[in-house]
Image (cartoon, helix red, strand yellow):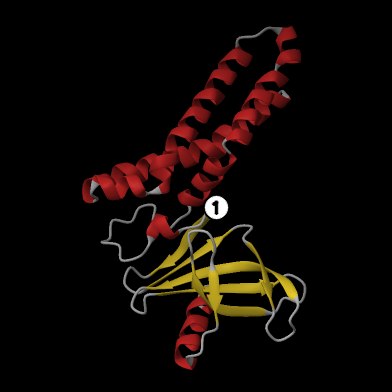
């Protein structure tokens, strides 16, 4: 099998499954959700990007398969074209991968949470009780924050974001990249800038800790 054929097989297997899973989910939830709510789901808005990529994969496969012996020397151009498309649509394709693994994918509940509107790019919901709490986990979400105890600017990786609709609050779980020390803070997403605050209520803090630890 040529390098181009191996590439096409791998891409079709991975993205083809995501495409089928998302289309199946849309068919499942459409009868139970208002159209305006359905259109707010990221995987619905971004699906045409994946559909186009699947079509490009199929076209490239046909062109390669119908070529003769000497065509294999020009097959790299198909890989280059597909790589260009993926690079131009990295954000949408990466998000669709996350959406295919999201707890919201097949959900038809009357949602009390922020859902896709509150989900960061390249993030998805990994836990939801459909009543009070959900937890999202982002990829490559790094914060530069000043440690109040030391006064030193540190870099932190975000491990998760917890939404508690009963308290109308969000919390963020972060880990220091260097010493691996973890913190949990109030999280206030903003239009231009997010802000954070200390959790002063011990009961509230313990609840957030236990909720997050239930995933580990």
Q: Residue at x 46, y 58 (%)?
A: 119
Quarter occupied by the C terminus: bottom right
- Where disc 1 sits, the SS reads loop
**37 left or right of 200 in image:** left
Q: Tell me where residue 114 appears, x and y as whole percent.
A: 38, 62
Q: What residue lies at 70% left-to-right and 86% top-to-bottom?
A: 149
Q: Badge 1, how many Cα within 10 Å: few under 14, some, many 20+?
A: some
Instruction: Say which residue appears at 33% left-offset and 56% top-offset.
Output: 107
Q: Is residue 160 above or below residue 60?
A: below
The relative height of residue 124 versus residue 11 in the rendered view (above or below) is below
Residue 175 pos. (x, y %): 66, 73
Which of 70/146 is in front?
Answer: 146
Q: Position of residue 167 (x, y in %)?
A: 36, 79
Res 216 seen here: no
Residue nearest the observer in this picture, 69 or 121: 121
> Residue 110's image quarter?
bottom left
Residue ID at (49%, 65%): 189
Question: Viewed as shown, does residue 47 lie left or right of 212?
Answer: left
Residue 109 position in % (x across, y down): 28, 60
Residue under numbered circle 1: 122
């Amino acid at each position: 099998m040529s390098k181009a054929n191996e590439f096409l097989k791998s891409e079709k297997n991975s993205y083809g499954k995501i495409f089928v899973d998302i289309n199946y989910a849309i068919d499942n939830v459409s009868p139970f959700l208002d159209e305006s709510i359905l259109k707010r789901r990221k995987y619905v808005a971004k699906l045409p990007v994946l559909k186009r990529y699947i079509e490009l994969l199929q076209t490239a496969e046909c062109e390669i398969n119908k070529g003769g012996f000497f065509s294999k020397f020009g097959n790299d151009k198909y890989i280059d074209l597909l790589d260009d498309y993926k690079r131009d649509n990295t954000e949408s394709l990466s998000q669709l991968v996350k959406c295919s693994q999201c707890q919201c994918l097949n959900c038809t509940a009357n949602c009390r949470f922020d859902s896709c509107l509150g989900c960061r790019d390249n993030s998805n919901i990994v836990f939801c009780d459909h009543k009070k709490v959900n937890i999202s986990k982002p990829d490559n979400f790094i914060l530069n924050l000043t440690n109040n105890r030391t006064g030193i600017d540190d870099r932190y990786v975000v491990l998760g974001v917890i939404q508690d609709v009963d308290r109308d609050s969000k919390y963020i779980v972060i880990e220091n990249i260097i010493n691996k020390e973890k913190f949990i803070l109030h999280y206030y997403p903003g239009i231009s800038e997010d802000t954070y605050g200390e959790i002063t209520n011990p009961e509230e803090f313990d609840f957030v800790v236990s909720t997050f630890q239930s995933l580990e």
